[in-house]
Amino acid sequence: MNRFEDRNVLLTGAGSGIGRATVVRLLSEGATVFAVDRDAAGLAETCGLAGDTGRFVAHVADLAEEEAVVSAAAAAVAALGRVDVLVNVAGVLRVTPMDSLRLDDYREIFAINVFAPVLLCREVLPHVPDRTGVVVNVTSTAATKAHPWMTGYAASKGALLSFSISLAAELSERRIRVVPVSPGGIATPLTANKETYAGIDTSWYARTYPLWGRPGRPENVAGTIAFAASADGAYLNGVEIRVDGGSHS
Ligand SMILES: NC(=O)c1ccc[n+]([C@@H]2O[C@H](COP(=O)([O-])OP(=O)(O)OC[C@H]3O[C@@H](n4cnc5c(N)ncnc54)[C@H](O)[C@@H]3O)[C@@H](O)[C@H]2O)c1
């Protein structure tokens, strides 16, 4: 399949997990990808995995900073000229009991999980073509299903989901689609990092894998993002796609 030939993609969170798998998938389908992450080594690893396509541009930026988001968007537009697809994947998870969560924790989580994609939309949408442009925002099942000890994370993903649904309506005039994609448990460094779970019993989380009895793989989400962003998803707009092996039911 070459669904992304002549399609320019700006993707964040490209240095690991779901973002990396999505870069590899989109490149394999002909896309040119401007890949952003704060982790330079992770980006280099993604580049190595993607092979020598000549269609990969790496950009290192900490998207928690507004100036860095604005610069990344400008660099993407300078490199690509036109951004056909914007995929916001970068995100952070904090697992903390609510009563020990500091306001700064919330600010940190919201800076990357909400404000970065919002700002990137603002900066990039003027360069997204009417009728064929697509925005995919990676949210989470935490947006709509209880995730104890992840209240800040859940609130941020809920905000991104709501933002995406309303943005879809706002952009309908330009016929630009917005699709929120919500993974359930996926095996990536985000969920494997035991420090994230310090002192918290997260055994409940393991019960959220009804389909396979184990988390999904980044490639499972990458395939869904590719579908949503391609012409195959042409009538998908403002609707959340859950990639969770049935954990929501
Ligand atoms: N893994 C899961 O189970 C799961 C479930 C639901 C939603 N998600 C969402 O999927 C997305 C990807 O998660 P993942 O599991 O691949 O995690 P990951 O940790 O493997 O990858 C996240 C990437 O985002 C980058 N990033 C984080 N903060 C950044 C910043 N300030 N500036 C630039 N880059 C930054 C990291 O460097 C990393 O490369 C996240 O938004 C996450 O919330 C993941």
Image: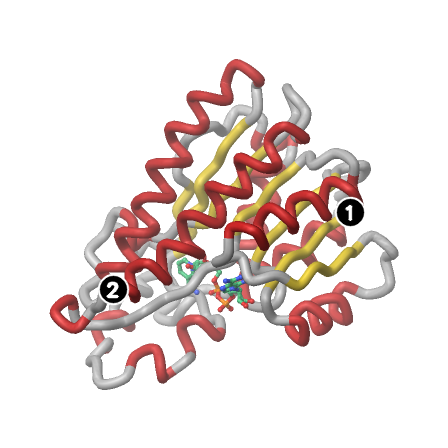
- The colour scheme applied to this rendered structure is secondary structure
**Residue placed most toward the observer, 76 or 213:** 76
Q: Residue at x 38, y 36 (%)?
A: 163
Q: Mark 2 — residue?
A: 150
Extreme residue toward the top, this view? 173
Q: Residue at x 66, y 46 (%)?
A: 10
Q: Is residue 128 left or right of residue 114?
A: right
Q: Mark 1 vs mark 2: which is more N-terminal? A: 1
Q: Is mark 1 within 8 Å of ligand 1?
A: no
**Residue placed most toward the observer, 38 or 158:** 38
Extreme residue toward the front, this view? 67
Looking at the rendering, in which quadrant would you find the N terminus? top right
Distance, label 1 to label 2, CA atoms, is 35 Å
The residue type indicated by label 2 comes to Met
Q: Secondary structure at mark 2?
A: loop
Give x and y (percent) for residue 131. 64, 20
- For the image, the number of numbered tags is 2
Q: Is residue 30 left or right of residue 229?
A: right
The residue type indicated by label 1 comes to Thr
**Residue placed most toward the observer, 224 or 99:** 99
Camera sees residue 20: no
Q: Residues within 10 Å of mark 1 (few under 14, many from 20)?
A: many
Q: Residue at x 62, y 67 (%)?
A: 15
